Amino acid sequence: MDIRVDDLSSTATRSLLRLHLAGMHANSPAGQVFALDLSGLATPAVTVWSAWQGDDICGIGALKQLDSSSGEIKSMRTHPDYLRCGIASSLLEHIIGEARARGLRRLSLETGSGPAFEPALALYRRRGFVDGEAFSHYQRSQFNQFLHLQL
């Protein structure tokens, strides 16, 4: 598997991003989807990586730099053909490594509640993320959750 910075121009990346956004909207209440679309990911504060096996995209993940010491994990999605193959774990480790290389001291994420979000929550918690307070522009609701990892 090859993990590389993604410029969001490939059809495969855009297709996986559309799948990610559709899943977020299908499994979240109206007004509670904070996933970034293509234009939100294509900003200087966000770096997107994609994982590839040959010509196949296996997953995507992004790091949004919030300030000089903190970042947010965004757009983590494994392609359905590669579920339970370690793609998300590899992308998460890559993002954590990049955050450390940038000198960040904390990584955070916002996600939802319910069965669709349980596999991701289990991954983050296994890696040491802990439940915490809302951060950045987010406000707590009955649906969303906030996890943090001190680096």
Image: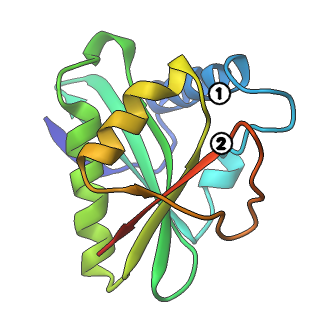
Q: Amino acid at mark 1?
A: Met
Q: Amino acid at mark 2?
A: Ala
Count of numbered badges drawn on the protein: 2
Who's the residue at 66% across and 46% down the image?
Answer: 36
Q: Give x and y (percent) for residue 29.
A: 80, 27
Q: Quadrant of residue 23?
A: top right
**Crowd around label 1: few <14 · some 14–19 · many ≥20 (10 Å):** many
Q: Is residue 5 positioned above or below 76 on the image?
A: below
Q: Give x and y (percent) for residue 96.
A: 28, 63
- If you read the primary sequence from the N terminus, does the residue marked by circle 2 or circle 1 appear first? 1
Q: Quadrant of the N terminus?
A: top left
Residue matched to label 1: 24
Residue matched to label 2: 35
Who's the residue at 31% across and 58% down the image?
Answer: 95
Q: How is the image coloured?
A: rainbow
Q: Quadrant of the C terminus?
A: bottom left
Q: Are marks 2 and 1 in contact (CB under 8 Å)?
A: yes
Of residues 60 and 121, the one nearer the viewer is 121
Q: Is residue 115 positioned above or below 39 on the image?
A: above
Q: Label 1, secondary structure: give it.
A: helix
